[in-house]
Amino acid sequence: MTLQEEIERRRTFAIISHPDAGKTTLTEKLLLFGGAIHVAGAVKSNKIKKTATSDWMEIEKQRGISVATSVMGFEYRDYKINILDTPGHQDFAEDTFRTLTAVDSVIIVIDAAKGVEMQTRRLMEVCRMRKTPVMVFINKMDREGKDPFDLLDEVENELGIHVRPLSWPINMGYHFKGVYNIYQDKLNLYTPDKQRISETIAVDLNSQELDQMVGEHDAEKLRMDLDLISGVYNPFDVNEYLAGDLAPVFFGSALNTFGVNELLDCFVEIAPSPRPVQAVERVVNPLEEKFSGFVFKIHANMDPNHRSCIAFVKVCSGKFERNVYYKHVRHGKTMRFSSPTAFMAQKKETVDEAFAGDIVGLPDTGNFKIGDTLTSGEDLHFKGLPSFSPEMFKYIENADPMKQKQLEKGIHQLMDEGVAQLFVNQHTGRKIIGTVGQLQFEVIQYRLLHEYGAQCRWEPISLYKACWIESDNQTELELFKKRKAQYMAYDKEGRDVFLADSSYVLQMAQSDFKHIRFHFTSEF
Ligand code: G4P
């Protein structure tokens, strides 16, 4: 196969959902279709159960599972599919945001009874920002849920994207009879089965046959629904989907392996192969011969005695090869990797090569941080890995004076891994850790102790938001920094950050300093 053919047959995507909508179940069923696993129940949910916030074994287990399921690659028809897993717990939202920078498209799972939920809304904002093509799978049709037309309206309004149903349910819950595949004009009759893949049948919508199969009443209702759909929605335009403006919608029941093949078959045909990536210097085309890639995730070893990590690199262009020297752009030095891993199904294995769209895992002993670029020699810096303002802040203090060095090292490595964000107060030099949720503080404290032998203590600080500031008016910027000296901090790249202690203070600052721009993300 040529380089171009290899790259164009790749589909790298993430499944996102609010917890419990069925992401794990759908992932598993996709693997089942790809022949990557043979029995349902093989993929473990990476959820931390709500009750387990201080159950350390649970967190450790979760880290173990999530490295195994971080990336799941498999072959389906002529395509190479890479599913990138995202953490289920909302306290790890930053991790999910970063994973979304490494995918070329997204499938959103929605629970038919619950509709669009909070976390889906937030993740969709990131997709919209990046113009990521999105498909929607409305799950749990085997249970009573909301009316399908209402669900479509809800998705359109709440997620801010146009929708176009490409499959349509015949009833739901107890009376669920199947889905009509609008994309292929085929009928798929429902038989609940957790393991088996159901057969689809080509059927003429206006034939008696349909009446016999689903009953006269439901056949008539289906015809009317489909008429309404073609009246209300424009014909499906794949370019609108690829531009991130239109989401095709499928209905089904992941648990019953139903409606999933409609989704997958359409997905491989229309989902984008690796897309061009914007670097600071230029746009990088995936089909370029020369390799380039960036680190979007770092995963520490579960075993505290081996403090090695795996850096996950998304190959952006060309081909990555084992034992070839590549440039680590931030360090300006070359490195080669003798045991890069790829992820097939749930197994990690050493690979000789990987193509644009693939993810390779590189063993790392502290050389990488999130956002680092590897290339065949060119100085490229990929954009699109911003830090977002944390929601919670605490001072981190040393609780064991003998272990100051270990603590410093631990904090820096954990921050490079992207576990949380570090801010250093410019006035006092005190360190502040910012997180999305409480669980991250607990993870940091636990890992500092178990991996670095350091003990930390948290002290409260009341802050509202971290704002990255910039201005074309240097005098005003200096004045602001002087006036707000106590609230000025450096982020880990040494950029100026204003730590506002309330929304009122922030509003006042914005109105008093009109030439300063306040950003809630580090990339603007
Ligand atoms: P998540 O990864 O999005 O958090 O969701 P997950 O797949 O773990 O699914 C959440 C729950 O919803 C699971 O039940 C799962 O079995 C159920 N589920 C998924 N798809 C369907 C479906 O199509 N129909 C129905 N009726 N249920 C579905 P659980 O009881 O929480 O877990 P388990 O004990 O079954 O594993």
Image (cartoon, rainbow, N blue to C red):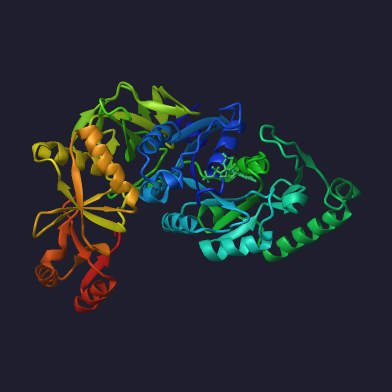
Q: Horizontal and vertical percent for residue 511?
A: 24, 78
Q: How many marks?
A: 0
- Give the image quarter of residue 354: top left
* Residue closest to the eye, 71 or 439: 439
Quadrant of the image occupied by residue 446: top left
Question: Residue visible at 48% across and 33% down?
Answer: 72
Is residue 412 among the parts visible in the rendering? Answer: no
Pinpoint residue 296: horizontal percent, then vertical percent.
34, 42
- Residue 377 locus on image (x, y percent): 25, 34
Q: Residue at x 53, y 30 (%)?
A: 74
Is any atom of residue 286 visible in this view? yes
Q: Quadrant of residue 320?
A: top left
Ligand 1 in which quarter: top right
The correct choice, above or below, for 379 with respect to 176 in the image is above
Question: Which of the two residues, 130 or 458, is positioned nearer the viewer here?
Answer: 458
Camera-nearest residue between 288 and 243: 243
Left or right of 102, for residue 421? left
Q: Is residue 59 left or right of residue 415?
A: right
- 186 w.r.t. 508: above or below: above
Residue pictured at 10% horizontal, 68% vertical = 478
Instruction: Give x and y (percent) for residue 357.
Output: 44, 37
Q: Is residue 354 above or below residue 487?
A: above
Q: Quadrant of the C terminus?
A: bottom left
Please indicate whether residue 494 sits to the left or right of residue 308 in the image.
Answer: left
Q: Is residue 35 left or right of residue 521?
A: right
